[in-house]
Image: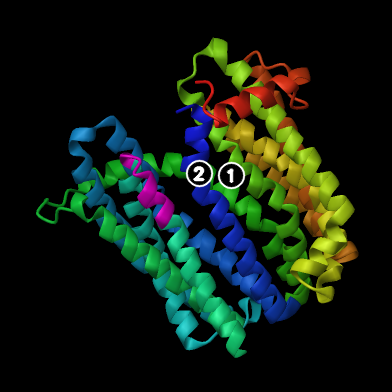
Amino acid sequence: MSFFRKAFLVNSAEFISLGIAVLQSVVLTRFLGPAGIGQYTIITAVLLLAPQICSFGVPLSLLYHSQHDPENRVKYLMHAFWAILFLGIPGGFILVFLLFFKANYFGSVTLLALIGTGCYVPMVLVHSIARSALLIKIEARKLSLLRIIPMICGVFLVVILFVLGMLTASRAITCLVLSELVAMVLGLFWARRYIDFSLKFNWGTVRKLGLMGIRLNWMDLMLLVNAQLNIFIVKYLLDDFESVGYFSRGQRIAMLIVLVGRTITPLLFSRWASLPEDKLAMHVEKVMRFSSTICVIGIVGLLLSGKWVILILYGKEFLPALQPMMILLPGAALYLLSRIFIPLLSSRGRPEVVIIALLIGAAINVVLCWFLIPSMDIFGAAWASTVGNIILLLLLVLMVKKMKYGIRVSYCIWINREDIGSMVKSLLGKSG
């Protein structure tokens, strides 16, 4: 079976999960309204960041050490579990403390939702360790189901509450926590054969996992922070959940380009780490042509139909999200292209230059937000995000050129007939 055909089969779960996520977003947005979805967005942004911070990169470190020292795979897995519990339980308490004592920022939530958020962090971390255990041997079917089943459960609960007229931001958060509980239970069930509690605990192994995890975690953490940064700043400066709601919906539609690209591009550049230098440039150019074509089509499509997309998905009440969405579109497209250069540099052992670029882009974004939001409202946040993404891409391009990979910019612009032909043949199984 060809590379493209295998890749599309393995990553089909990502396409399905993207559709499920859009459906859930539509239901939540239409029922909760601008203020309700604004509060939900702020809290879920914290819920996304908290496990990433508390993990110290241990799930990534588990993958790294298991691949480099397969004979001690079970030892690394068990110590990763112990480390995650040690990190996750205090992290959950800190998150509850933050949401409770900063209710003026996050809004009030029910006691059940508050308890759920405390459990969310350790559950996500245990789920991530179980997922890493499945990734070691690339158990594709189980990984796909682990991705899809919890999302379906979460959407089902949200729809039930929607039908009964009982959906609130707090209950939506509870549904998210319950879906993560499903993911953790499934993950543990499928990874149970790798678990061995008879192993003796060793601080040296935990330290080894932690040190490597911190090195590996920085880039993923920076990417996640950059994605949520403007949401937090809008709420802080405007102190208004409705503004957050409008901005987040415009951002979500604009970022559909990135979500689709992130689903598709791993199918193409998953082999970069092992490609020899003489073939690397050609492969990167092909990915860039593919992604830039997605960007152009996505931008043109949303510019022409953006108003109708908002009306169909979210309703007339969310038309104020249209202009921020238009401003965010170019930046979202450039961010997708940046997400191609990031794994290129990382796969060649240069993650530190990626972190520098991300820090500079984030700093410029924050400064612009501070100056533009007070006078331009959420439009200022949109312009700050777009400018930050432009700077990020320019920095990454300069770094790639400096590394002298032999990539020709003129060959990265638009997909050609040969590219389309080779992909069609590969997907039909006629080559490779």
**Which SS class for mark 1?**
helix
Answer whether labels 2 and 1 touch (C-beta < 8 Å).
yes
Tell me if mark 2 has few (under 14), some (14-19) or many (20+) residues whose alpha carbon lies within 10 angstroms of its own.
Answer: some
Q: Is residue 17 left or right of residue 247?
A: left
Q: Residue 240, relative to residue 290: is it above or below? A: below
Residue at horizontal 41 percent and vertical 56 percent from the top: 145
Q: Residue 409, relative to residue 75: is it above or below? A: above
Q: Residue 359, relative to residue 244: is it above or below? A: above
Q: Which residue is mark 1?
A: 263
Q: Which residue is mark 2?
A: 11
Q: Which mark is residue 322?
A: none
Mark closest to the chain's N terminus, 2 or 1: 2
Q: Quadrant of residue 307?
A: bottom right
Q: Quadrant of residue 165?
A: bottom right
The quadrant of the image that shows the N terminus is top left
x and y percent of residue 158 in the render?
55, 77
Query: Which dot, 2 or 1, sits closer to the camera?
Result: 2
The amino acid marked with disc number 1 is Thr
402, 249: nearer the viewer: 249
User: Disc 2 to disc 1, how far (Cα)?
Assistant: 7 Å
104, 38: nearer the viewer: 38
Residue at horizontal 50 percent and vertical 31 percent from the top: 270
x and y percent of residue 403 in the render?
61, 18
Q: Which residues are magenta?
A: 136-145
Colour logic: rainbow
Q: Does the rendering let one see residue 45?
A: yes
Q: Residue 115, relative to residue 339: is it above or below? A: below
The amino acid marked with disc number 2 is Asn
Residue 408 colored in magenta in the image:
no
x and y percent of residue 419 in the render?
68, 23
Number of numbered discs on residues = 2
